[in-house]
Image (cartoon, helix red, strand yellow):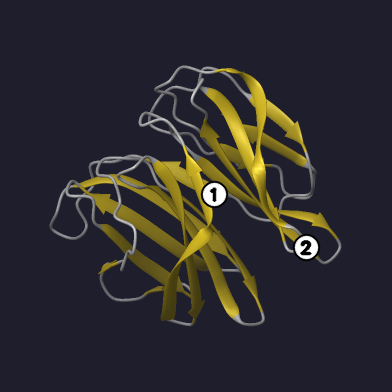
Amino acid sequence: MRTITSSNSARSVLKIFASPIILFTAVASSQVDPSGAKTVSLAASACGEVDIQLFSQDASGKLFFRQSVAGVWQGSAQVIPLKVEAKPKKPLAAVSWQDSSGDNIRLYYLSTDDDIIELVISCSGAACTWSSNTGFKVRTIPTSGFAAAYIRISEGDWGLRVYYLSSRSFISEPTWNSSSGWTSGYQIGEQAHANSSLTVSVEPGTPNLQVY
């Protein structure tokens, strides 16, 4: 099992027996400075054999993207064009998968109104297109961490899961699949501390999903 942890110590582990997990998401915070501006948040995802996507946010709230295609990093980090402004110094979550069209990536970030925004990214090789998904807009508390996962629901059916803290600091789980789109968040687990970071890990080849 591959486990990913955030910068804060995990206080509890919530095990969810859902669908077989294909890929995982990484959520982290850092003080790394890859592009000349102080980086305050990082997230990464991976798909296929060797493709990696790296996202970062600087102290002003700008989001940056850099990717490795077929094991080769493509140039320097580029600024992500956003229709909805990102709130500075907040966590990021990313997840990706690969199909015949290329790499499909989702980035989740917090808006200045404390809504979780889904950014849709499609890449064919090093060429990428960007759009905001107006069908996904989830209000959370300003101190919430969040995480995301891409899962296999059944043969030929795939899904997304996002985890965040509700207004009462319970972990909530909006779900998406190709047949029904996004559904409202389900409350899972016990009440968490309002400043909790959230992280997802998966056990490849099993239906086990863990939220920290």
Asked whether residue 32 appears in the rendered view, the answer is: yes
* Cα gap from disc 2 to disc 1, whole angstroms: 23 Å
Q: What element carries label 2?
A: loop
In which quadrant of the rendered view does residue 13 lie? top right
- Residue 25 location (% of width, % of height): 54, 49
Of 84 and 199, which appears nearest the observer?
84
- Residue at horizontal 29%, vertical 61%? 64
Q: Mark 2 points at which residue?
A: 179
Q: Which image quadrant: the C terminus?
A: top right
- Residue at horizontal 52%, vertical 39%? 4
Q: Left of 52 or right of it: where is 91?
A: left
- Give residue 115's mark: none
Q: Left of 98 or right of it: where is 157?
A: right
Residue with the most extreme right position = 155
Of 132 and 58, which appears nearest the observer?
132
User: Is 85 rendered above or below residue 189?
Assistant: below
Q: Left of 2 or right of it: where is 62?
A: left
Q: Left of 148 or right of it: where is 55?
A: left
Q: Nearer the viewer, mark 2 or mark 1?
A: 2
Q: Mark 1 points at which residue?
A: 25
- Residue 69 location (% of width, % of height): 46, 75
- Residue 194 location (% of width, % of height): 43, 20
